[in-house]
Image (cartoon, rainbow, N blue to C red):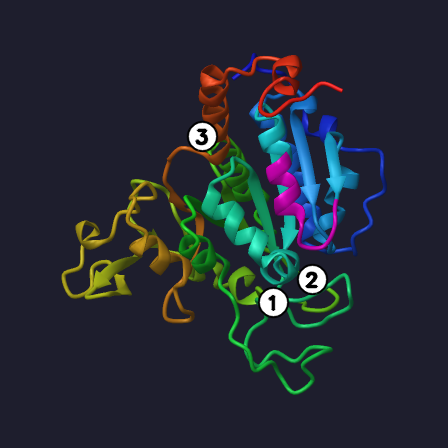
Amino acid sequence: MSEQINLSPKDFKSDQEVRWCAGCGDHAVLNAVHKSMADLGLPKEKYVVISGIGCSSRFPYYMNTYAMHSIHGRAAAISSGVKVANPELNVWMITGDGDSMAIGGNHFIHVVRRNVNINILLFNNQIYGLTKGQYSPTSLEGQVTKTSPYGTIEPPFHPGELVIGAQGKFFARSIDNNVKLCTKIFTEAAQFKGASVVEILQNCVIYNDKAHGYLTDKAHKADRQLILEHGKPLIYGKEKNKGIILDGLQLKTVTLGENGVTESDILVHDAHNKNPLLHLMLATMPQPELPVALGIIREVQTRTYDEKLVEQMEIVKEGSKIKSMKDLLHSGNTWQV
């Protein structure tokens, strides 16, 4: 990494008016991104922010970096091209649950599978907000929306399940009103070499207000949120007396001190385990039986697509007889007129 640059979050703010609705969770996420980029210590010219279409995809206008507001569902393809063309750039892809899980679903799973070294921030408000309240691929079954007046009849996608199923190596989850946690996760995701996906549980105050209210309720959030840390036991709760154990092939909540349960019985989080089974279980824990896992769920380092591509090109160039345009034009079948 190049020499550390001392910048503040303000240095990453553009001069554009932020035009999200008052109270939208996107405001908090934007602040966290500004903080994270300042913490990373890279020059502004090293960052590229690329979005698709949706409320969250207005992000590029509010960034004082290189940026592109692209087209619906294609941010993954454009981000991949930018990273492959210039591997030195720090590429951030901003997308929503509709932009990435619906029209962009094919691009999304393959950028994850290929492990292109980009940072994907996936805003999940379980609704299409920009187009005024249609149900999205993550809307809950039975949810009443503009396009499901009698309730949806579709089971929703779980982003973490989709990422891990696509052989993803980094998946984390945060929530918009916890700027400190978002900043920490964004920074670690940006430092990870490979495709990092951060699902952000984000509130749309207009079309799906309090979609994540179960988690953010001040009186109960400590008992409903499990903040993960690699190498530490899965303990949570207002009194820090609840924990997660593996009961057969299921995760189960227990209370420390009851039925002889001690901290040694509690599962210890291993984000680096290559086997994705427990990561998948953590990403899909059902409520209210279990808490919602926040933090880095999976972080497994392996070679990236862009690293392998650059290496392959160097090997091909080294073994090729063609060293210049002249060599190319005079190669193969040629004739003189």
Q: CA distance from mark 3 to mark 1?
A: 41 Å
Does the magenta portion include 31? no
Name the amino acid, label 2.
Cys
Q: Is residue 83 visible?
A: yes
Q: Point out which mark residue 308 bears.
A: 3
Q: Point out which mark residue 164 bears.
A: none
Identify the image quadrant of residue 60.
top right
The stretch in magenta equals 70-81
Q: Is residue 200 visible?
A: no
Considering depth in this image, is 4 or 106 the residue closer to the camera?
106
Q: Point out which mark residue 204 bears.
A: 2
Q: Position of residue 34 (x, y in %)?
A: 66, 34
The numbered mark, 3 or 2, whose residue comes first in the sequence reads 2
The quarter of the image holding the C terminus is top right
**Disc 3 vs disc 1: which is toward the camera?**
3
Name the amino acid, label 1.
Ala
Is 11 on the left-hand or right-hand side of 96?
A: right
**CB of mark 2 within 8 Å of CB of mark 1?**
yes
